[in-house]
Image: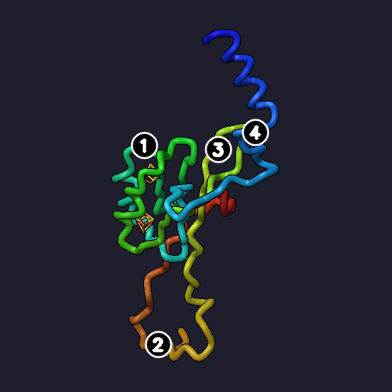
């Protein structure tokens, strides 16, 4: 490129606005087709692991014993396969990008535990232990594996 054309282009661009956005001061523009990132409604999730098996980027880990669903957002390629195969429709693509991070990290969601027998709602018709017939004692429940306390990303 000749120096004349280069000078002309430089002068013309001096009076123009920047071609890029000053992110994050000015948020990115999202369209309905922006793929963004994966969100899981953990209340609906049944920890079936289908999403983990079908993820081409091995970005998902489901641990049924611990009741956790984990995504590595830095491995996810936003292909949407997990959203399509989820039988409970608990996954969706949120059309926004995740916040910038200085270090790679996983995002773990913990499935809320169902209420134990002693936490049943009021009005339960279940007979008290003393009213049960002899020999109909229920076997002792196995202790549940300890679940991690971290919720969210
Ligand atoms: S496929 Fe859906 S229901 Fe099954 S573990 Fe994944 S998110 Fe949960
Ligand atoms: S969008 Fe694709 S790459 Fe990302 S977690 Fe789902 S299946 Fe894996």
Indicate the position of residue 5 as horizontal and vertical percent values: 57, 14
Q: Is residue 77 above or below residue 93?
A: above
Residue 68 at least partly seen: no
Residue matched to label 1:
57
> Which element is circle 4 on?
loop
Compute the Cα span from label 2 to label 3: 51 Å
Ligand 2 within 8 A of label 1's CB? yes
Q: Earlier in the sequence, mark 2 or mark 1?
A: 1
Taking depth in this image into account, of 41 and 94 the one nearest to the observer is 94
Ligand 2 within 8 A of label 3's CB? no
Residue matched to label 4:
18
| Residues at discs 2 and 1 in contact (Cβ within 8 Å) | no
Residue 16 at least partly seen: yes
Compute the Cα span from label 1 to label 3: 15 Å
Taking depth in this image into account, of 119 and 92 the one nearest to the observer is 92
Compute the Cα span from label 4 to label 2: 78 Å
Q: How many marks?
A: 4
Q: Is residue 106 above or below residue 131?
A: above
For label 2, the crowd category at 10 Å Cα-Cα, with few meaning under 14, some 14 to 19 and many 20 or more, is few
Residue matched to label 2:
132
Q: Residue furthest top?
A: 2
In-image side of 144 versus 10 (left or right): left
Q: Please state which of the two labelled residues, at mark 4 or mark 1, is closer to the viewer.
A: 4
Q: Please state which of the two labelled residues, at mark 2 or mark 3, is closer to the viewer.
A: 3
Taking depth in this image into account, of 88 and 109 the one nearest to the observer is 88
Indicate the position of residue 54 as horizontal and vertical percent values: 29, 45
- Which residue is at a point 36% across and 62% down the rendered structure image? 89
> Which element is circle 3 on?
loop
Image quadrant where residue 3 sits: top right
Q: Earlier in the sequence, mark 1 or mark 3?
A: 1
Q: Earlier in the sequence, mark 4 or mark 2?
A: 4
């Amino acid at each position: 490129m000749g120096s004349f054309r280069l000078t002309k282009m430089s002068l013309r661009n001096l009076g123009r606005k920047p071609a890029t956005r000053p992110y994050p001061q000015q948020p990115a523009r999202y369209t309905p087709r922006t793929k963004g990132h994966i969100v899981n409604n953990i209340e609906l999730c049944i920890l079936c692991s289908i999403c983990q098996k079908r993820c081409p980027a091995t970005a998902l880990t489901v641990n049924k014993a611990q009741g956790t669903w984990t995504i590595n957002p830095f491995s996810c390629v936003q292909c949407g396969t997990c959203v399509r195969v989820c039988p409970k429709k608990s996954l969706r693509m949120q059309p926004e990008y995740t916040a910038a991070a200085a270090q790679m990290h996983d995002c773990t969601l913990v499935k809320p535990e169902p209420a134990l027998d002693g936490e049943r709602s009021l009005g339960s018709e279940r007979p008290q232990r003393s009213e049960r017939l002899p020999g109909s004692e229920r076997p002792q429940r196995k202790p549940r594996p300890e679940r991690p306390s971290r919720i969210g990303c």
